[in-house]
Amino acid sequence: GGLTPTPQKPLQDEFGIGDMEFAMLGSVVFAGLLIGNLFGGLLADWYGRRVCLIAMGALFCVAGTASAFAQSLLQFSILRFITGIGIGSMIPVTDAYVLEWSPTEWRSKLVVGLIGVAFALGTIFAAGIGILVHEGFGDGDIWWRVFLLICVLPGLIGVPLIYFMLPESVHYLLVKGDRAEIKRLLKEMSEANGTALLADGEVAAGSEHSGTKTGEDQEQITELFGPTLIGTTAYCTVAFVSCGFIYWGSIFIYPFVLEQIHGMEITEAYSAVMLNSCIEALVYIPFVIMMDWEGIGRRWAMVVGFAIVFVTAVIAPLVVGNVTLFICTNSVLRAMVAGPFTVLYIYAGELFPSTLRTTGIAVCNSFGRLAAMSAPVVTQAAFGLSVTVLYALFGAFALAGLLAGLLFTRETLGRALPVYTSELAAQIKAEEVAKNEAKAPLLSKTGTSVEV
């Protein structure tokens, strides 16, 4: 709800702003997402996933509530910026947390179900509330304030639940060397599930590291640009930028395009947003199947998604005159970019080691937040030129993501989550050796090659 497009006409009437000023107001939220995304990832790697989720969730609740009572454009802008910080901090941390508690074979299903589908359902909830509140309160300066208040309710419910029910990530505790707490949590979980506790709850980091808090284990952010992770960092950055611009740009500009070209009212525009979100929720099903399918995996699921987005971006301006076809095409565009966007959070979390997981996701996604922050202003300007320019822009970003996926070749399907960068380097080296052996001809015991 905190990210659902704020109603345009009521805010323009309330604060006396034009289209471009409204677009800049949308960018303020994404600026907060950028700051929150970066610092949330760092804080989660320093102080823990649970602490970060509680603190940033509380910040979202306070700022989101206060923004409904803003009396000036400046107040509203500052409070929406802070709201963005709270949401932006929680996104990479939630992703890392779910990944780190998920069994390997269930990882993609749980992340898609608990994050991807939940995000789409949240958008449906917000759009539905927007329609109901507008119908109940009518036009004026009241209904959008009530709308913002209701959108804070999930946070007000969620933060206490996190505080009382959510344990810390075992991977974070392993990096920090708190084996006693890990053992306690695993014992508690085994008792709750009625299963035997393996190895009496003793865990190993899976590398030469002991999991104790040493200078070597405190990996620096510069490792993201070292030889082991530079390719991963570059790919994830391009993918996050492509997804961020297309997804948030389409969410922002789509209701405005419907209003300007087809003369839709606010409730009709929100109904179209709900349709998009419903299709988005359904699209997660084939993406879960694809990303867990041997031979496709995370990488090719990303490539397929970007390819379809590119095609729909080409088609959209050709059918703009037909409202039904135009809505259908935009629904596919929005839904198909949501697929790679969700897969990317799983893929990136598996690509980075536990010591830098939330930091790596946050740093790469910060560039995606920059793209999202620019999206309202850029899409508004592009639409001012023509619908064709707007969708050519979406197509260009989709093509960038597609090409990046073709050039980056690492796959993580079925792989265990690495804890340290050194462990990841050994894993990559072993994969390269196995790949080279598979390509090379088999040698007989006498040293002669055998045709296969």
Image (cartoon, helix red, strand yellow):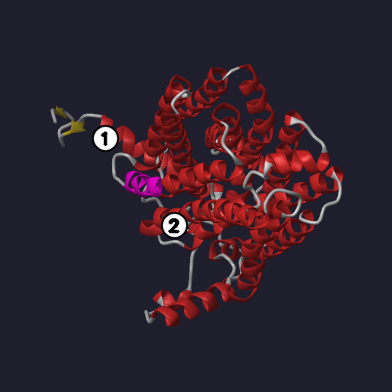
Residue 218 appears in the rendering: no
The amino acid type, in three-letter code, at marker 2 is Gly
Toward the viewer: 141 or 359? 141
Residue at horizontal 70 percent and vertical 51 percent from the top: 144
For residue 438, the mark is 1
Residue pointed to by mark 2 = 113
**Res 393 → quadrant:** top right
Magenta-highlighted residues: 282-292
| Few, some or many residues within 10 Å of mark 1 (<14, 14–19, 20+) | few
In the rendered image, residue 309, in percent from the top left (x then y), is placed at 44, 30
Residue 386 appears in the rendering: yes
Toward the viewer: 128 or 226? 128
The amino acid type, in three-letter code, at marker 1 is Ala
In the rendered image, residue 296, in percent from the top left (x then y), is placed at 32, 39
Q: Helix, strand, or loop for circle 2?
A: helix
In the rendered image, residue 37, in percent from the top left (x then y), is placed at 67, 47
Is residue 23 depicted above or below 361 in this figure? above
